[in-house]
Image (cartoon, rainbow, N blue to C red):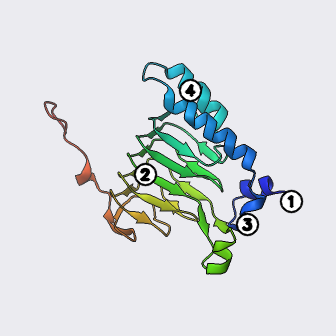
Amino acid sequence: MDMLEIMKKEEAYCSDHRDMPGELQKKAKMLCWRYNQTSPEEGDARAEILRELLGTCHPLTFIEPSFRCDYGFNIHTHGLTVINYNCVILDTSPVHIGENAFIAPGVCIACSGHSKDAAQRAAGIGTSAPVTIGRDVWIGANSTVCGGVSIGDGTIIGAGSVVTKDIPSGVIAAGNPCRVLRRVTEEDRCRITGEERE
């Protein structure tokens, strides 16, 4: 199995940096650079670049520059996806983003890591594990989602959180490390100013 096949699998792996597909990373860096040079009026150009960059790009994928990723082909959007300013996705493994995902400014999704052994780390031995973000998830500003994590449907990750373990569906979770605070309930529904609500 070649490195590209390993990277696309939904499994954790360890690798030598020399085995990683450098040419594909260069391509992603150039596409990100082009994307980040577009003006707010160039919606069609942005959509075209995202279709070339991402592995799966739902038509309702909106990413505000500046955006950076390692490879792009391992990022998959599955419905409306809104990614705000200054997001970084280190997609050395697959990253699946469910429909109606809201990812706030400064979020980092990092599949990649390094060996815990100092000698291996210095030699360029790395780790990687996939990330799955469910439907209707909101990830707050400046949060980090680490490799191997799944976030359940309808969950909110509070700003500044560091998500190191799976978070279930339908909860508000926050902190470093991120932990469940409570369930999302009917009491969390907004009452829109100027409108009568039942």
**Which of the numbered marks, if any, corresponds to residue 47?**
4
Taking the view exactly as shown, the residue that stands out farthest to the right is 1
The CA distance from mark 3 to mark 4 is: 33 Å
The CA distance from mark 1 to mark 2 is: 32 Å
Residue drawn at point x = 50 percent, y = 33 percent: 36
* Helix, strand or loop at mark 4: helix
Viewer-proximal residue, 141 or 170? 141
* Helix, strand or loop at mark 1: loop
Q: In which quarter of the image is the N terminus?
A: bottom right
Horizontal side of 123 relative to 197 (left or right) equals right
What amino acid is at disc 1? Answer: Met
Q: Does the image show residue 55?
A: no
**Which of the numbered marks, if any, corresponds to residue 15?**
3
Binning the other alpha carbons within 10 Å of mark 3 as few (below 14), some (14 to 19) or many (20 upward) gives some
Q: Where is residue 135 in the image (x, y as percent from the top left)?
A: 49, 48
Residue drawn at point x = 56 percent, y = 56 percent: 132
In this view, the mark in front (1 or 3): 3
Considering only order in the chain, which callout, 4 or 2, is on the residue closer to the N terminus? 4
Provide the residue designation for mark 1: 1
Circle 2/circle 3 CB separation < 8 Å: no
Binning the other alpha carbons within 10 Å of mark 1 as few (below 14), some (14 to 19) or many (20 upward) gives few
What amino acid is at disc 2? Answer: Val
Binning the other alpha carbons within 10 Å of mark 4 as few (below 14), some (14 to 19) or many (20 upward) gives some
Considering only order in the chain, which callout, 3 or 2, is on the residue closer to the N terminus? 3
Q: Position of residue 126 (x, y in %)?
A: 66, 67
Considering only order in the chain, which callout, 3 or 1, is on the residue closer to the N terminus? 1
